[in-house]
Image (cartoon, rainbow, N blue to C red):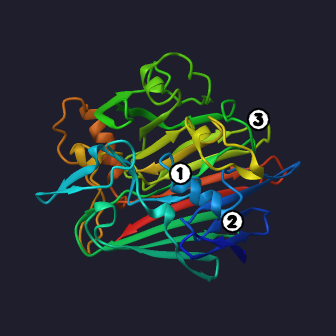
Amino acid sequence: MAQFRSKPFGVTKNGDKVDEYIISNPGGLEISVLNYGCVIKNLFVPTKTGLVDVVVGHDTLADYEADFNSSGSTCCGAFVGRYANRIENAEFSLSGKTYKLEANNGKNHLHGTFPRKIYDVKMFGDTLLMETESPAGEDGFPGNLKVSVRYILTPDNTLRMDYRVSTDEDTIINLTNHTYFNLDGGGNVLGQKLRIYASNYLEGNNETCPTGKILPVDGTPMDFRTGKPLGRDLDTGFYQTTMAGGGFDHCYVLDRPRGASQSLCAWASSDKTGISMKMYTTQPGIQLYTGNFLQNCPSPGKGGVPLEKYGGFALETQHFPCSPSHPEFPTTVLRQAKSSGPTLRSASSPAVSAAVCKQISAAAKGSSLVGAALCCFLGVLSMPCGLKIFAVHQTG
């Protein structure tokens, strides 16, 4: 049975009280979550030398506020939306109407306001429930949203995150968790190994917005299918990593067996700590970001240590960035008072092969608009300590 405790974490500049909620289980796993941005502040995994905090973050609320309100917000550990990653030119069209969004990333829209929201909290059984609302017009999006996020830590070391959203007007939605992992517990992540179960990725332009082309990873530095150190192919001069700030900031099109509701999408490990992490998802894509600009964060990291370039890697399970601009991508439209899984529209773009279209369609079938992710952390104890993080997104 999970154990809960809470303690004050601070007061925002607007006078809102923020608390830290700590969930632990008999296996020794411990996670702390803030009701500010639903931030995962700490995630402790037991190893033979003690607990290791495997997520990047800050020590104080003032540091989180300064970070999340800056032009280069890292969104460390936060629940992001209304639309995870970018919407090109900060606009989209829906039902014949064009909506202008806040341009908060150059001329594009990035992530949205959810990391800066205060959430109402309830605790019951093994569940920590956080709820908020997003009014119509926030960031320029239509529809009044009701949003809930559930964190559930079970006796078998499963941490489940459920995202539930409803709207009173047709809108678009793309949610994810933006935790940066560092399985060493500090330093850069370039020596940590990563495997991504994807044969294709979305080509990005010089603003890291998808061009619409779905390209094979084979024979390129984008290939993580068999696993490799994160830093092995960063200095090859490959145009996709160069334009992303000397690292990865790309959405991968996941290989999912037809009919599967979820599948293994990524596997990371640290030789230093012996910790490994598996991630599962129901979503069609996963965005790999290697913290290429973490060094620009205005707030210090934990212990007052400045964040460093490549100091963490994010694995953001999601629908595709810029989907409203690319009708061949799985749709992110959420209809009023209707629960709907994503469907693949006709592949009108010649850049998308029929085989890849079938793959995306198979990935989309049976999943909801906002998807699922599951992480398993394994320590080096003789009785491994596993953590599963399962994020289920439901609509309606």
Neighbours of disc 1 within 10 Å: few (<14), some (14-19), many (20+): many
For the residues bearing labels 1 and 3, Cβ distance under 8 angstroms: no
Task: Identify the disc placed on residue 205.
Answer: none
Which residue position holds label 1? 280
Q: Secondary structure at mark 2?
A: strand
Asked whether 7 or 27 is in front, the reply is 7
Seen at 53% across and 53% down, the residue is 75
Q: Is residue 7 above or below residue 79?
A: below
Q: Is residue 308 left or right of residue 273?
A: left
Nearest to the eye among marks 1 and 3: give it. Answer: 3
Q: Secondary structure at mark 3?
A: loop
Asked whether 242 or 330 is in front, the reply is 242
Question: Which residue extends farthest left?
Answer: 96
Across and down, in percent, residue 367 comes to 37, 58
Residue 39 visible to the viewer: yes
* Alpha carbon distance from label 2 to label 3: 25 Å
Across and down, in percent, residue 299 comes to 64, 50
Which residue position holds label 2? 32
Task: Identify the disc placed on residue 271.
Answer: 3
